[in-house]
Amino acid sequence: MLHLQFRNILNKDMKLIKLKPGEKAIAFGCEKNDLPLKLMEMGCLDGTEIIFLKRAPLGSPYYYKIGDTRIAIDKELARKIDIKLLNDGQEKN
Amino acid sequence: MMDKKKIKIALVGNPNTGKTSLFNKLTGLHKKVGNYPGITVNRISGQFNLEDGTEIELIDLPGTYSLHPNSKDEEVVLKELLFNDEKIDGVIVVADVNNLKRNMILLTEIMDLGYPVMLVINMCDEMKKRGISIDTNKLENLLKIPVFLISAKKAKADGNKKGKGKIFELKKRILEIFHTKPKLFFPKYNLTSLNLGFLNQNLNQNLYKDWLLFTEQQNFKEKVAHQNPQILELPFDPKSVKRLLQKEVIKRYQDINNILSQTYTIDKSKASGITERIDRILLHRIWGLLIFAIIMFSVFQSIFSLATIPMDWIDAQFAILNSYLKSVLPPGQLTGLLTDGIIAGISGVLIFVPQIAILFLFIALLEEMGYMSRIVFLMDKIMQPFGLSGKSVVPLLSGTACAVPAIMGARTIENSKERLITILTTPFMTCSARLPVYTIIIALIIPDTKIFGIINAQGLALFFLYFLGFAMALVSAYILSKVIKNKYKRYFILEMPEYKLPILKNIYITVIDKLKAFVFGAGKIIVAFSIILWFLATHGPDDYGKYNLRSKHSIENTQSTSAYKLEHSYLGIMGKNIEPAIRPLGYDWKIGIALLTSFAAREVFVSTLSTIYSVGDQGNDHLLKEKMANEINLFTGKKTFSFAVGISLLLFYAFAMQCFSTLATIKNETKTWKWPIIVFFYMTGIAYITAFFAYQILK
């Protein structure tokens, strides 16, 4: 599974906040970026798949599926997390 | 340990794992609610007996994702497991089958602490549907602890009596945890890489315990010093410590992945995605907000108007009881104390029951179904700048009906700082008891005309008062959020739990618990206040009794008799004595007395004035209004209820803390008199200052 996903990595690094609704990515550099321990404990680690589900109606917070957990985080955190965009165009699993 | 007949077991788990459901099923309704000193977190414990007679005390600890706390509530878990002198004998970790990996982080930490542990995997009724299978035996062997699958929601609590059922089986296996030696996960290099290797040799038994003491030393200096002063002598660099903590999390996840890959399979094609689909509607920028508004409106409507039906009924029953007692008992002090003091007080407590029950019915329902987290998601943007939680919307809105249930509703806010700020600012919201006061004063000073031909001026004034209360609540919240210190940085990280059908039993238990907490907590204080107020309003110094005796025969003028009695009671004397203080606000001693009696409930202002102006206390508003309009202030020689005085009174009632039921509830929720006292002086201070300037400028 994970192996398959890595093949689909687009060579495009960006911050989580730039993700568009429905897009998938994988997290990296979690330690380097000094993420709050709690977020890592909840499963946001290098290689974890992240899907952007929704932005709150009033603009913030942001709602993701990170690994197996649905988590809402604020803008500041979404700006901190590095991701690699996944090409999920056709392949739906 | 096994010869001990009394065993203390802590129930620990991530939030939203159904931990409390399991607690309720295991202990039945035999629970004890205490509190942790200094914080507004309840300590909930319950008891049950095993077949062999062993007594188990089960402690339900707040939900947390790990032992490293991010809030005062999560601190409780660490305090109980690491710092408590009355040691916990064993731990049951509750995990959600749908998110086992993440749940096991906490499990491995607790195993490393050296506690005998059992893993209870909850919500197992959903396994088939989601294509999950677990090799329990292998998992037990790898973790070296008992593992138990259950659906706490479906398990029968009375299984114990019949000797079967999942709860019974679980109880049977509880003692197994003391026969096992859990696998350890803690990476020793955490110590060696910081040159703390010598911790290894020098210090006591458990490495992970030392590591926790070391990493949490900034938050718990005294406690760490008490347990192991040597640790504080070690060099501490927060950055490298955090790096190691992160590495530790990664290592734990690796080990857990390794274990789960051998024991846990999930068929991803069966993932329903139903929560995400519901969220698409409930969090939609139009529909989501609309549905939220409708839900909040229903909550408001229910406590504002639906609750008045049972409230009026309770009121009527007590009135009947009181008039019956007065008719059969000989008139005198004792009858007065019983009817107008004690029974009136009890009625004053029970009158809140419908509103509290209805509000918590809604709150528990929304919480159970997973919607509360969505409220936070929707409202955080608005509330966060004021130091409030998105969930504060519920208490604040409920506060427009009554502050008492609203303040209790703040319990659902996890973060204790946000909860405290919500509790302290909710009393500013315009509650329904202020309405009769507003109505009569607005009618006196604002003409019943239309502005621009459509907007009713009196209605506009009333709206403005609602707005004023709300604005002052937010301003105060902002100030408080700057004043109250919080050692934890506020990151917004919120799990959005799955939507679930509510478990009615849990809702029932929540409502009953809150009612009990109110009636036996705040209720006692309210009855005591009520008796004191009764005494002050019906007793006076020496010459008071003479008039009493004399007036017995002058039946034709009972109304002015009661006016005289009130005037010469202790309360009346107090009202007269505060006159110099309230004269700058434009009030005379008659208003002074009404301000004091308002402590029973603000609307008493109206009936007190009726008594003083001898209109008779049975709501003859028209006559009262006429009297008030013609009343002349003896000191100024002008009308007592001039425009300036009216505005001053409206502001005073908008801001002043005049309700002892609210104060009693704040005391009950914060477990200290400190906060109700602060609220009293803060609110009344603001009321005094604004009323003072309004009167001085307008007069």
Image (spheres, rainbow, N blue to C red):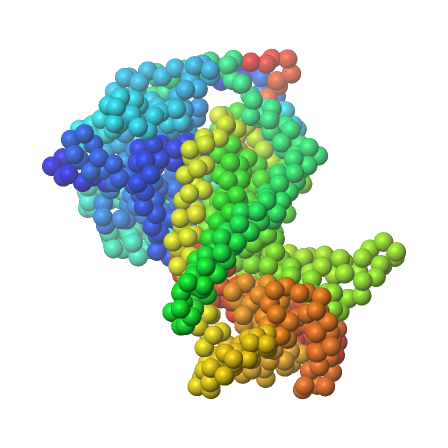
Residue situated in front as seen by the camera: B558 or B103: B558
Quadrant placement of the N terminus of chain B: top left
The residue sitting at 52% across, 33% down in the picture is B370
Q: Residue at x 64, y 56 (%)?
A: B470
Q: Estimate the x, y position of residue B236 in percent, counting from the top left.
A: 35, 50
Residue B118 in the image: above or below residue B640: above
Q: Is residue B440 visible?
A: yes
Left or right side of B297 for B33:
left
Q: In this picture, is B213 found above or below B442?
A: above
Residue nearest the viewer, comparing B300 with B237: B300
Farthest-out residue, right = B453
Extreme-left residue of the structure? B3
Q: Nearer the viewer, residue B215 or A11?
A: B215
For residue B495, say whether it is visible: no
**B382 horizontally vs B368: left or right:** right
Residue B594 location, quadrant: bottom right
Left or right: where B361 falls relative to B333: right
Q: Residue B137 location, x and y as percent?
A: 27, 17
User: Which residue is pictured at 28% across the width and 29% down the height?
Assistant: B118
Q: Total label count?
A: 0
Q: Where the C terminus of chain B falls, by quadrant?
A: bottom right
At 35% from the left edge and 25% from the top edge, which residue is drawn? B155
In screen coordinates, is B219 left or right of B88? right
**Can you give x and y, in whole percent of width and height, for residue B92 in the image?**
30, 33
